[in-house]
Amino acid sequence: MTTIKDGKGRQKAPLTPWKQKSTKAKKPLPGVGSMDGRWGYPAIAPFFLIFLIFGVAPVVYSIYIAFFKWDPLGESEFNGINNFIFLFQDSDFWLALRNTFSIWALSTFPQMMIAISLAAILRNKRLKGKSFWRTILLVPNITSVIAITIVFQQLFGREYGLINSVLGLIPGVENIDFIEGVIPSHIQIATMITWRWVGYNTLIFLASMLAIPDELYESASVDGATKWQQFKYVTLPSLKNTITFVLIVGTIGGLQVFAEPQQLAADGGSTKQFLTLTLFLYNQAFLNNKYGYAAAIGIAITFIVLIISAINFVITRKISGEGSR
Amino acid sequence: MKKSATRNAFLGAFVAMAVSLGVLSAPAKAAEQITLTIWTFGEVIQPGLQREYQKLHPEIKIIPIKNDVDPLHQKTILSCQTGGPADIIAFEVPYSGYWRTGNRPSCFQDLRQMKTSGINASAGVAAGLSANDIKKNYLPWRWEQGVAFNDNVIGIPTDVGGLQVAYRTDLFKKAGLPTDRVAVSKLWPTWDAFIATGKKYVSKLTPAEKKAGKGFIDDAGSIYAAVMNQGTVKYYQPDGTDGGKLVYKTNPQIKKAWDTTVKALDAGIGARLGQFTSDWNIGMNKGAMATILAPAWMLDYIKKQAPDTKGKWDIADLPVGGGNQGGTELGIPSYSKNKQAAYDFLTWYLAPEQQLKVFKTYGLFPSTSVLYDDAALLDYKDEFFSNAPIGAIYTKGVLKLKPIFEGELQRKIDSTFGAGLGRVASKKMTSAKSYALVISDIDKLFKN
């Protein structure tokens, strides 16, 4: 209980400066004043209209059908909270939860480390062709997931994959089955996710690294700090907020992993070893025709994301301390 | 038909681009121009024939949009509620049970109400033909898979997925087995004999080959579907109702197919290469398997994936005889704005003449039974498969086929059994335990 109170108490802290800012902003800036009033609403209306149609309406509708046995082309019958009761008793749901978190952990943490290291390298002022390196980092991110999966399957193939071919050179090493094995299959999926997102995160880290004032490094080097010490005591602490951001965005993305496992095997593997939450939802709706049940799963995922985000928030607050900028 | 995701992905992207360009440029065209949008997958719409039809009718533009089988099914359900741009939609036979049941047939135009317009009279399709008039050209049970339970004709069959055994003559010779297709067919009158042949083959492999994962058959799990389709009942038994009665717990055919497959798995005759994976494609080139249970439509895939193995393959009969896998229907969604043009295209595209052309170019076996005593089909030989008379071999198999009742969740149940056998193959579970899990997983499908 005390920790929750703590969390609540701390939540208020960052809000205050923002509130102050908003009171300041009440004084209309010269020239912008006329935009302040009624013209503001039509200007922002397109976004909210589209959001209402494609964002809010489907959410409300899926909450509605979560209480039905829903058949899009037939008769639907009211099912009360049975979908939810069934969900908590469904071992596949808990399995999917486990898989999702395992894949999330295997992709998020290595990804962070690689991204921070890459950003530190790219930050180097003597590096040639900076824009080229920065651009190329984004290429994996804009590549289709299906194409990525096909290429990675050639790397991870059990018999003729590149990784197993290399491992095969070591005597006594058995081929690893990157589909049937639980952890190996998670590693394969996590690698695909890492490959796709590491460049994007590198750029975010790079941007916030470039915002660190040079004086900090200068004074550190005057004090005799090595490059590593500079990284540890100047760069990392300054990145705390960015790390929080990347972690939260990564968590939300991690809970929605879908295309990679679906491309490996639509049913999530023979023992459902890489069935993730969203794949579970998709399969219930679109393979098993249980649309109402799938809607209930969607609601459950929403709550899981909320809980995780709250935990994330509390933990990262604690790590970054009160002195966050 | 199972389709390679690779080709679909790239083709899908390309087609999507082509379509968006087409849509943008459409208003500039003359008013009589008709655009037929076809939602399809894999090789169902052949580019060669599509060009031929457009040459016949320059005013008609055909735009195939490819998806994978399952996403296409979802798109079809959605478009049925909301309307959509498609004029023709392909659906696989395992999904036919879904579309034939309840009030879902209303999503498709009843083709009995349509009449050919006669624009293809010069190409052999007379005017004024309804679906009832062309029915006689098709294999009767195959035709029925496109007839809904309210007697509406919602789809016309494309190919029939006759199943036979493709085998490597060079590898058979090396293992001291006969190579002649008649002698090879005699090796396995039963599935037990097939497994015994496999054991003999595997015993001749060197330890190095065994370590490299070579085997007699590409994936022993594929035996399950072959045995299942030799029966008359799968998971649903016709009982006069639309849905049929669920018999997945009691049908002895299932147990037989399961046990035969497990026996093959235990005998270690499989190379454990899942079909349509990258390992499978590479293994085909490396001689990792000596046999593949190949539906007619797969022959083209083998040719394309392993061109260097030309002349090393031959085709023998399936154990017991008569196997089937896959097959597709083409239907016209109710919301289509070009029903007449779509029907004219369908009746031409799926007419015996065109089906024969498709078979010769792409290996999809015709569903038009009028061809089955036609010398053009029976005498057709393929160089790639050691000049095997594949027309005659597949005809023989198809004629032995018995109709199978396809139920609503057929495809899902099939894949649940597939996963169960996968667990046995990877030695994660014993056969009995895995079977029990399959049954409880299917039970869950019908609960809640």
Image: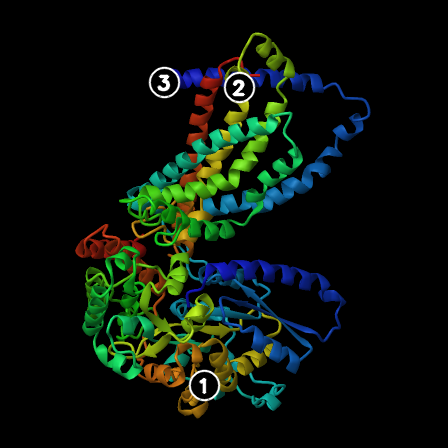
> Circle 2 — which element?
helix
**Which residue is found at the position 33% from the left and 47% from the top?**
A168
- Disc number placed over residue A231 in the picture, else none: 2
Residue A63 position in % (x across, y down) = 45, 44
Residue A68 position in % (x across, y down) = 40, 51
Q: Quadrant of residue A203?
A: top right
Mark 3 or mark 1, whichever is nearer to me: 1
Q: CA distance from mark 2 to mark 1?
A: 77 Å
Which quarter of the image is occupied by the N terminus of chain A? Answer: top left
Q: CA distance from mark 3 to mark 2?
A: 37 Å
Up-down relation of residue B376 to residue A146 (above or below) = below
> For the residues tagged 2 and 1, is the chain the same?
no
Horizontally, residue B444 falls left or right of residue B46, namely: left
> Circle 1 — which element?
helix
The crowd level at tag 2 (other Cα within 10 Å; few <14, some 14-19, many 20+) is some
Q: Nearer the viewer, residue B359 or A250?
A: B359
**Which residue is found at the position 59% from the left and 46% from the top?**
A53
For mark 2, name the chain. A
According to the image, label 1 marks what residue? B135
Mark 2 or mark 1, whichever is nearer to me: 2
According to the image, label 3 marks what residue? A1
Q: Amino acid at mark 3?
A: Met
Q: Quadrant of residue A91?
A: top left
Q: Amino acid at mark 2?
A: Phe
Q: Quadrant of residue B405?
A: bottom left
Look at the image and tell me whether residue B276 can be seen: no
Asked if the residue under mark 1 is in contact with the one under mark 3, i.e. CB atoms within 8 Å, the reply is no
Residue B321 position in % (x across, y down) = 27, 79
